[in-house]
Image (cartoon, grey):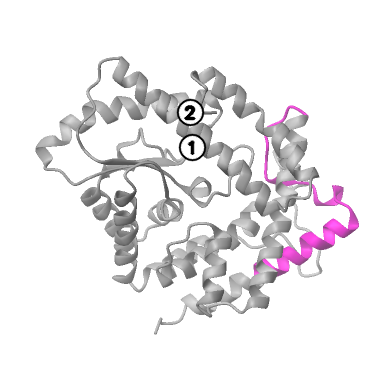
Amino acid sequence: MNDETSIEGLAATRKELLTVARALLTETHSTPEVMEIISYIHHSIIRKTYQLCFAEMLAEGYRRPTIKHCFLLLGSGGRREMLLNPDQDNGFIFEDVVDARLPEIEEFFGPFSDKLVVALEKVGYPLCDGKVMCNNPLWRGRLTDWQQRIHDWVQNPEPQKIRYSSIFFDFVRLEGDSALAQSLRDIVFSEIRSSEGFLSHMLSLDLRDKVPLGLLGRFLVNKEAPHKGCLSVNQGSSSCIVDCIRMFALEKGMQQTTTLGRLNALVERKVFETDTAEHIKAALEALNFLRLRNEILLAENGQQPSHFLDPYQLSKSEQELLKEAFHVVSKLQDATKRHFSKPCI
């Protein structure tokens, strides 16, 4: 990976992830281990793409500003929970400098961000539909700029701003100054503490989706194209676990960004009982296993990897496993609603 010197070569490496994922899933690795390995490879590819683009900028005569900066991965990339086909979620932080230096920053990081996003798409990372990418000026800025944005998200929790925060609050540094990332995380926790109602607003949006399971235990599948006869093992299921655990972690000011890391820390803080946490872990592993296996099968057949699958194509034991996972998700949603719907003490 470190020896790769072209975007085309990185794209070829990116395509090999299917083979790697298939091999890992058939070995004795647990699904969390497989996701961690896949995420590590994604991070390595994205980091190398960043480095090649940065070198190209200098070779083209652009002058790098003498400021500290940090490139962030957001969403599943920040949580190190990437599967076969993650899109781009990224941004830049810059150290606080006077306004007079902003043109100097933009003269380099504007074109660099454009170059990087295009290169990542060529490598195999689709553009984010919501434009949560560093080539969007809303996703790069000084620490003070980020503080103003986060303050606005927290104090004016409209649905779109809550969506932004749900993606952003899982950020992790990929390249650049780590102290900037830590300062940004401190800002996040400070802003959340200053607004007791924000997490309740986040709750109302994050937990809109219900598990696709009827009262009589029948799967609720889509009735219309393009996913007719299928259900999602992400929406209303694994994503709900991620969202619920994130909310508890944000409330407690925890530094962890992975869902399992947050869950373990919440057990240590006595927020969750050990048995409850183990059930949540098992449910998340089951959902991610079924999703990853489905993505592999689709990719092998030349189709786009997806979190939608036909539950009736699963074995009877896997159907029961999926139903049990849905029950755990539903219980976690109820517990989260009870906790965040009451005043925090």
C-beta proximity under 8 Å, tags 2 and 1: yes
> What x and y, as percent, mark residue 267?
56, 75
- Main SS of the magenta segment? helix
The quadrant in which residue 92 appears is top left
Find numbered disc 2 in the image and state the secondary structure of the residue it sits on: helix
- Is residue 9 visible to us here? yes
Answer with left or right where residue 255 lies relative to residue 325.
left
Find numbered disc 1 in the image and state the secondary structure of the residue it sits on: loop
Could you tell which of marks 2 and 1 lies nearer the N-terminus?
Answer: 1
> What x and y, as percent, mark residue 84?
64, 38
Residue at 54 percent of width and 18 percent of height: 8
Q: Residue furthest right?
A: 316
Q: Residue furthest bottom?
A: 345
Residue tagged 2? 120
Residue at 77 percent of width and 59 percent of height: 322
Q: Identify which residue, 221 or 37, lies in the foreground.
A: 37
Answer with left or right where residue 208 lies relative to residue 133.
right
- Is residue 208 visible to us here? no
The quadrant in which residue 90 appears is top left
Q: Amino acid at mark 2?
A: Leu
Residue tagged 1? 88
**Which stretch did the figure color magenta?**
301-330
Q: Amino acid at mark 1?
A: Gln
Mark 1 residue crowding within 10 angstroms, few (<14) / some (14–19) / many (20+): many
Residue 95 belongs to magenta span: no
- Vertically, is 150 above or below 93? below
